[in-house]
Image (spheres, helix red, strand yellow):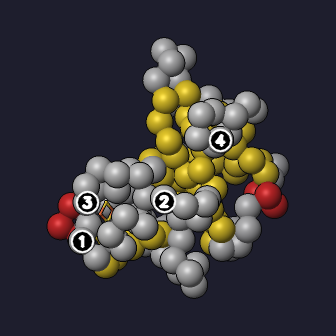
């Protein structure tokens, strides 16, 4: 994996994101998904227990990236996904808006992933 301009590892459809044991529990990590046509989309993983969930790094409130500092996408207690822009929170498992200004605008966009042999991979497009 190489680094993109924002230092997130670049991954391709079907590619490996990281190993399950490389994600803290609870924890999160950003990646840059690059398609064959050069299109790039920022995504992130969230782990809670043995569950791992992938989302596009895009808050439905004002169409901004969720994290502004560091690599954390979680509330301090690790219980929800947090948009640091205006404080909206989202359910880790479903991506549904849980509190804050994003509630009228729906949920985060899921990224299909699969875990095989301890490796977290993007599901084929
Ligand atoms: S852009 Fe996410 S809460 Fe406003």
Looking at the image, tell me whether mark 3 or mark 4 is earlier in sequence order. 4
Mark 1 crowd level (few <14, some 14–19, many ≥20, 10 Å Cα): some
Instruction: Check disc 1 and report its element: helix, strand or loop.
Output: loop
Tell me if label 2 and label 4 are in contact, CB under 8 Å.
no
Residue marked by disc 2: 67
Looking at the image, tell me whether mark 1 or mark 3 is earlier in sequence order. 3
> How many angstroms separate mark 1 from mark 2 (CA)?
16 Å
> How many angstroms separate mark 1 from mark 4 (CA)?
29 Å
Mark 1 CB lies closer than 8 A to ligand 1: yes
Mark number, residue 74: none
From the viewer's perspective, is residue 80 above or below residue 19? Answer: below
> How many angstroms separate mark 3 from mark 4 (CA)?
25 Å
Residue marked by disc 4: 7
The image shows residue 68 at horizontal and vertical percentages of 48, 59
* Left or right relative to 27: residue 85: left
Q: For ligand 1, which image quadrant applies? A: bottom left
Tell me if label 1 and label 2 are in contact, CB under 8 Å.
no
Residue at horizontal 55%, vertical 28%? 34
Residue at horizontal 58%, vertical 40%? 6
* Left or right relative to 24: residue 61: left
Tell me if label 3 and label 2 are in contact, CB under 8 Å.
no
Mark number, residue 101: 1
> How many angstroms separate mark 3 from mark 2 (CA)?
13 Å
Tell me if label 1 and label 3 are in contact, CB under 8 Å.
yes
Residue at horizontal 62%, vertical 29%? 12
Instruction: Check disc 4 and report its element: helix, strand or loop.
Output: loop
């Amino acid at each position: 994996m190489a680094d993109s301009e924002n230092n997130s590892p670049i991954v391709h459809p079907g590619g490996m994101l990281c190993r399950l044991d490389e994600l803290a529990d609870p924890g999160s990590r950003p990646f840059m998904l690059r398609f064959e046509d050069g299109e790039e989309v920022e995504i992130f993983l969230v782990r809670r227990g043995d569950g791992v969930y992938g989302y596009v790094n895009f808050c439905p409130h004002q169409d901004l990236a969720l994290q502004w500092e560091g690599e954390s996408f979680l509330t301090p207690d690790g219980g929800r996904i947090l948009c640091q822009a205006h404080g909206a929170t989202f359910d880790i498992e479903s991506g549904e808006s849980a509190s804050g200004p994003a509630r009228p605008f729906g949920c985060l966009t899921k990224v299909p992933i699969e875990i095989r042999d301890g490796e977290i991979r993007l599901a084929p497009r």
